[in-house]
Image (spheres, rainbow, N blue to C red):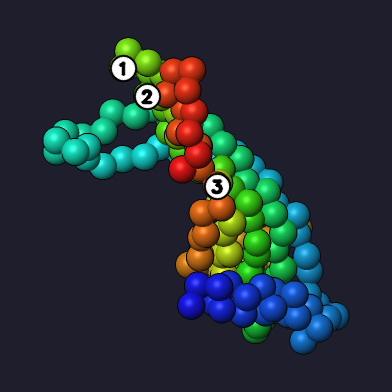
Amino acid sequence: MKIRLFTFALILLVSAPFVTAQKTSFGILGGVNFQNLNGKDYFGDNLENQIKTGFHAGLNIQIPVVPDFYLQPGLLFSTKGCRDTESSEDMKINISYLELPVNLVYKPLVGKGHFMLGFGPYLGYGVSGKLTFGDESEDI
């Protein structure tokens, strides 16, 4: 089911420019992630992990829907995880995802530029992970 949904979204992303080719625009995205894993451990104590710096990179398309509103699907590769340096051994968790965001963006003209406000869901698929504990590492 996940593969079918991912394939459908990818086909939509690739074919969208042909629907309104004259006003559709493409973008390249890149940025920094500051990620942490929160929750409770096996004994019910809160996890005390530290923030890990990662990155994301990808592509998106802006498809005009009505004046000043755009549908903005994209495809991103993103790295996330956490660190724990308070234990006797340093522990790091690195996780890589493919993410498919589908945002609705409001982009009115304000002066010589545009104000941009967007929101929407995304579908994420974990493609790899690695747990490093001291000098040992294991794929997860």
Residue occupied by mark 3: 128
Q: Position of residue 62 (x, y in %)?
A: 70, 70
Residue occupied by mark 2: 84
Q: Amino acid at mark 3?
A: Ser
Is residue 40 left or right of 118 when viewed as pictured?
Answer: left
Find numbered disc 1 in the image and state the secondary structure of the residue it sits on. Answer: loop
Q: Report the front residue among 119 and 41.
A: 41
Q: Position of residue 82 (x, y in %)?
A: 43, 33
Residue occupied by mark 1: 87
Q: Nearer the viewer, mark 3 or mark 2?
A: 3
Residue at 63% across, 51% down: 77
Q: Report the front residue among 63 and 8.
A: 8
Find numbered disc 2 in the image and state the secondary structure of the residue it sits on. Answer: strand
**Which quadrant of the view contains residue 54?**
top right
Q: Is residue 80 visible?
A: no
Separation of marks 3 and 2 at Cα, in angstroms:
20 Å
* Mark 2–mark 1 CB contact (< 8 Å): yes
Q: Report the front residue among 67 and 85.
A: 85
Q: Amino acid at mark 1?
A: Ser
Sequence-wise, the earlier of marks 3 and 2 is: 2
Counting every numbered tag in the picture gives: 3
Which mark identifies residue 130? none
**Which quadrant of the view contains residue 98?**
bottom right
